[in-house]
Image: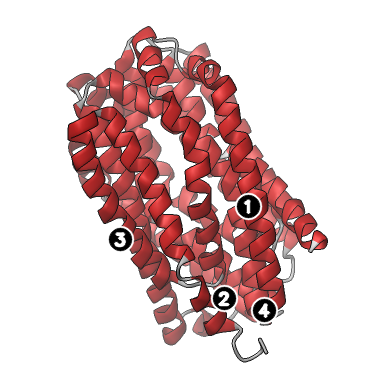
Amino acid sequence: MANWYRRVFLLAVPLILSNLTQPLLSTVDTVLSGHLPGAAALGGVAMGGIFFNGIFWTFGFLRMATTGLVAQSHGARDEESLRLHFWRGMISAVAIGAAIVLLREPLIAASLSLLGASPDVRQNALVYCGIRIWSAPAALANYVVLGFLLGRQHARMALALQAAVNVVNVAVALTLVVGLHWGVAGIASATFSADWAGLLVGLVLIRIVWPSGAHRPSTWSAIVDGPSWRHLFALNRDLLLRTISLVAAYGWFTRTGARAGDATLAANAVLLNLHWIATYALDGFANATEALVGEAVGARRAGDYRAVLKASTVSAGAVATALSLLFVFAGSTLVGIFTNQAPVRTMALRYLPWAMALPLVSVWGYQMDGVFIGATRARELRDSMMIAFLGYLALAIVLGRIMGNNGLWCAFCCFMILRGSLLAARLPQIERANFAPAAV
């Protein structure tokens, strides 16, 4: 068992570092906009960030499906399937990204209208979204690249890719915003540049780690095989519905906060950035779980599956505890880094205890996601998330009326508990489906 803890950490630590670089795209945006005059710039960039998180999370199945399928093919030592999964994922990503660009105007208008905001915040959000949306094909293709690297357990390569993206983002943002005073337009242009640079770096990394596969694709007839695409469509459909429920939960949270005023919206955005930092850290263990569970399922090794489940969950729980303690002792300092707007800081500190609790209540849902993604059990992911969302919605409406913004945060914590508990109750289904014949 000690060896499995070591394997989990060797895979998870680079993935944690890699994942922690991902929110830097929105964190850098938040920090820079938080130091622009007035709260409208921060609110607009926060609103734009929610829009892109919603759009890109909606199609997060590109990364999740690729990880699970590639990990299982890796465990089964099936090189042909690896090639097919990669190319089908890339074709899907480019097609979806192109559709987003073509439909950009109605998408942005409808999303910002649903989220709700003051005219000043909305204007800044329109500027941000109108520039950054042109990177959609690159951002989605990067999901496939990351999914492949993760499924093949190339954690250091995933770290290198994310580091490159964020170096470009920080360098361009500082140049455009601090040096040239482009404001919100500079923030969006930096993120746009980082997404496209990341895709170029990712393709180079794929060529390095997979020289015999990436540049020699399977035949076109194998790639467009009808039954395989139908299977992929069913998997992606369930993951899409699962993700839409998750995005809807964040969207409802943002909309409710926006209706309480610009200061509350901005304060919630600051605290959500703390939540996202913790999420990406904990997702390192969830991502490691995806790869190792997928490998165990592909190789049909029940003992490995159980060892991974125990080692990754215990390790993630320990890190979640450490993150909660970090927010307890350094939360006020972190809030001050995100914004120097006094009303926003005061509001954020009022609700900081909820951000302190979130790592401990959310880690179990992330871990269960990793298990079910690795096993490609998308139907269970879909059903559990939809039920959890409905429970959250009811709680948010009731508690919001009673407790205001505190009620909204309380409902959000309950949502995280629900998503983990519902999946944990379905764990026996994975063993029955994949290991029952061999587990005697």
Residue 124 place in picture, x, y as percent: 29, 24
Mark 4 near mark 3, Cβ–Cβ under 8 Å? no
Q: Which residue is mark 1?
A: 285
Please name the residue that numbered disc 2 is placed on.
Answer: 84
Is 375 located above or below residue 260 in the figure?
below
Q: Which label sits in the foreground, 1 or 2? A: 1
Front residue (pair 319, 203) = 319
Residue 184 or 342: which is nearer the viewer? 342
Question: Residue at 63% across / 52% down in the picture?
Answer: 285
Colour mapping: secondary structure
Which is nearer the N-term, disc 4 or disc 1?
A: 1
Q: Position of residue 189 (x, y in %)?
A: 44, 30
- Badge 3 element: helix
- For the residues labelled 4 and 2, the Cα–Cα distance comes to 26 Å
Three-letter residue code for mark 4? Ala
| Residue type marked 1 | Phe
Q: Secondary structure at mark 2?
A: helix
